[in-house]
Image: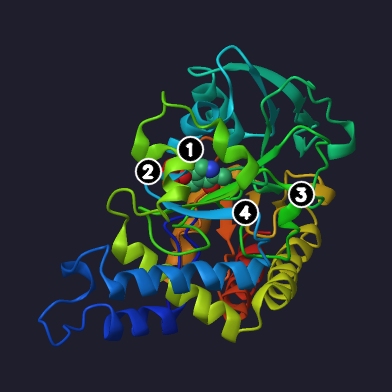
Amino acid sequence: MPWNFSAGPSALPAPVLERAREELLIRDKRGSCLLERSFTGAEFVATMTAAEAGLRELLAVPDEYAVLFLSGGAMAQFGLLPMNLARPGQPAAYVESGYWSGRAIEEARHFCSVSFAARHTVRDGVVHLPPPDEWRIDPDAAYCHYTANETAQGAEFHIQPDSGLVPLVADMSSNILSRRLDVSRFGVIYASAQKNLGASGLTLALVRRDLLSRSGSAVPSSLSYRIQAAESSRYSTPPVFEVALVKLVFDWLRAEGGMPAMEVRSLYKSDLLYRAIDDSAGFYRCFVAPANRSRMNVCFRLGDEALTESFVADAEAEGLFNLRGHSRVGGIRVSLYNAVPEAAVHALLQFMDHFAARHG
Ligand SMILES: *Cc1c(COP(=O)(O)O)cnc(C)c1O
């Protein structure tokens, strides 16, 4: 059986894909399927409303938050955040923790001034995230942005930060819906769909309603949090297929036991892998501090880095795919999103064990 450990676009639950094939493309009595009818018609509105209700139930999203279904990906949000939340000349605070937060900062600089609340460190080749209780957030900042899970390095914040009066903004593209979450601690949460939610083309944003009034007229209307919230994310045509697909994912997640179940599973799967790495007597080496290791993207190197290519090739021969690390990081990356079953992890562990025995 082939197993897909892709970092994104990544594995989707098989029952969701089967239902999508059955449901989404069925033509109704008037001859149209989901992709062929108006986004303002009753059928699609019902689908989108159900998707929103599903998410609200899964994450216990309080009423004071608008749920937005946007397009453009998380990287578009890197620029849209300062455009929607910062007044001209107002700084925004950023936590620099690795590759994706770096990209967010680089983009934000085109639209506001950036102050650093904290930065990650690499000591003896080991990545350490800055502990949230040591962040120093500029009290004048429009918001404080952090990347909840650094997908490329495999480093995750396991503590929900407290940013005081400055609204906290989180890029949760690669760990949303993998654990329980206290949404009320955040000003904005956003996530691309193609990692742990659904298919690319959709970006989810939860925006505390008191922040909506900050979106001024300088923001293009279809990208304005305020206007999209007022128009129920249908100011312009939303990505209809992706919205319908994510609704099926939410249905699946609720049937599987919701966030408590995903929390247990993601810890279980990642713990198994980290334990195998730590117990390999240096054959495999994790380069993230234990307290910051990601449950979603387990990254490691081979002690003898010259073996990396044969690790990847031999894994593929055993049906284990998409294990190459991010291009900027190298090594191996195992992405363990909700749709990756425990059986995939067991197959990988067995392969890692045999590979180490052959080369150790
Ligand atoms: C993948 C990823 C992004 C980029 O998402 P796009 O949809 O390609 O724009 C941003 N942030 C994080 C944490 C990611 O994992």
SS label for mark 3: helix
Q: How many labels does the image show?
A: 4
Earlier residue among tags 2 and 3: 2
Q: Residue 185 carries which label?
A: 3
Q: Residue 95 carries which label?
A: none
State the image coordinates of residue 24 (x, y, percent, origin top left).
27, 78
Residue 173 visible in image? yes
Q: In this view, does 293 lie above or below 168?
A: below
State the image coordinates of residue 64 (x, y, percent, origin top left).
66, 54
State the image coordinates of residue 332 (x, y, percent, origin top left).
57, 51
Gap between marks 2 and 3, in whole Å? 25 Å
Gap between marks 4 and 3, in whole Å? 11 Å
Name the residue beneath numbered marker 4. 65
Q: Which of marks 1 and 4 is in front?
A: 4
Please tell me which residue is depicted at 72% across the width and 70% down the height of the picture. Answer: 263
* Position of residue 55 in the picture relative to residue 222 (left or right): right
SS label for mark 2: loop
Name the residue beneath numbered marker 1. 77
Q: Is residue 336 above or below residue 217?
A: below
Image quadrant in which the C terminus is located = bottom right
Name the residue beneath numbered marker 2. 72
Q: Nearer the viewer, mark 1 or mark 3?
A: 3
Report if the beta carbon of the residue with label 1 is closer than 8 angstroms to ligand 1: yes
